[in-house]
Amino acid sequence: EREAKIRRLVDANIVGIFIWNSEGRIIEANEAFLQMVGYRKADLRPDGLSWADLTLREWHEHDERAAEALRTTGIVHAYEREFRT
């Protein structure tokens, strides 16, 4: 039931949403996110677009803290950020 709710949110394209794997590769993104950053679904191949490709240097420290929080607590609070397009 929870996965179905998340899938509906992703598919609604009202906000940009993406999912990445432990290596930082973006494995899924909805059209709203892809339009924001100027990429296409075809760019989401296994050797393609990564989280690091989109990250500006000034966000690296914040992202590392968020990744550490995810590893230690399993929770990352939502935050706004900038992406490189």
Image: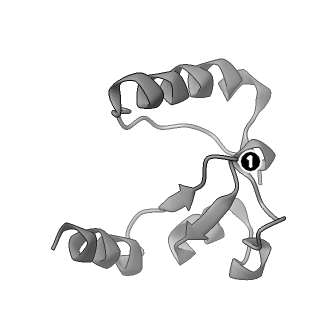
User: Relative to 56, is 66 on the left or the right?
Assistant: left
> Which residue is most to the right?
47
Residue drawn at x 49%, y 27% is 66
- Residue 35 position, x and y percent, is 63, 70
Residue 48 falls in which quadrant of the image? Answer: bottom right
Q: How is the image coloured?
A: one colour
- Residue 22 position, x and y percent, is 61, 47
Q: Secondary structure at mark 1?
A: helix
Front residue (pair 7, 35): 7
Residue 58 falls in which quadrant of the image? Answer: top right
Quadrant location of the N terminus?
bottom left
Quadrant location of the C terminus?
bottom right
Residue drawn at x 68%, y 47% is 24
Q: Amino acid at mark 1?
A: Leu
Look at the picture and state if 49 lies above or below 53: below
Look at the picture and state if 11 lies above or below 25: below
Look at the picture and state if 29 lies above or below 57: below
Look at the picture and state if 65 lies above or below 44: above
Residue drawn at x 34%, y 25% is 73
Image mark count: 1
User: Relative to 1, is 16 on the left or the right?
Assistant: right
User: Relative to 45, is 33 on the left or the right?
Assistant: left
Front residue (pair 66, 40): 66
- Determine which residue is flagged by label 1: 54
- Residue 34 position, x and y percent, is 63, 69
How busy is the neighbourhood of tag 1: few (under 14 within 10 Å), some, or many (20 plus)? few
Residue drawn at x 53%, y 59% is 19
- Residue 11 position, x and y percent, is 39, 80
